[in-house]
Image: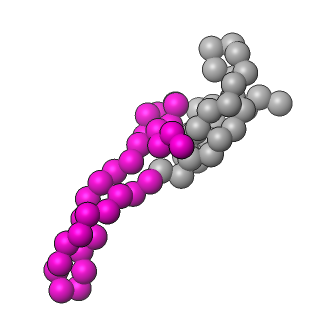
Amino acid sequence: MARRCVVCDKGTTTGFAVAHSNRATKRKWYPNLQRIRIVLDGRTRRAYVCTRCLKSGKVERAV
């Protein structure tokens, strides 16, 4: 699955999960992507868009 928003280019972030003992292990944070039909450059297509772009109205949904 594509892990990148086509509108804002938000992607996976990496870092450390730090335990109470301060032991660090690698982990990832994934964006909340939804596969929806959008109008992009005048054409309808399916794309992965993050929920923040959907909620703010940066994307025109195809009906």
Q: Camera-side residue: 44 or 2?
A: 2
Dominant secondary-structure state across the stretch colored magenta = loop
Residue 23 forms part of the magenta stretch = yes
Please identify the residue farthest to the top as the structure is shown: 42
Is residue 60 in the magenta section? no
Q: In this view, does 20 lie above or below 56?
A: below
Residue 23, x across and y down, in percent: 17, 78
Residue 19 relative to residue 56: left or right: left
The residue segment tinted magenta is: 1-30
Q: Residue furthest front?
A: 1
Taking the image as shown, residue 31 lies to the left or right of residue 26, namely: right
How far across and how far down the image is residue 19, in percent? 25, 80
Q: In which quarter of the image is residue 38?
A: top right
Toward the bottom, the furthest residue is 21
Q: In which quarter of the image is the N terminus?
A: top right
Tell me the quarter of the picture where residue 25 sits.
Answer: bottom left
Residue 48 higher or lower than 19, as above or below: above
Please state if 41 lies on the left or on the right of 1 as rendered.
right
Q: Nearer the viewer, residue 56 or 19?
A: 19
Coloring scheme of the render? Answer: one colour
Percent from the top left, x then y, of residue 16?
24, 65
Q: Residue furthest right?
A: 63
The residue sitting at 31% across, 62% down in the picture is 27
> Residue 59 placed where, x, y %?
63, 31
Instruction: Write the residue at 19% across / 72% down.
Output: 24
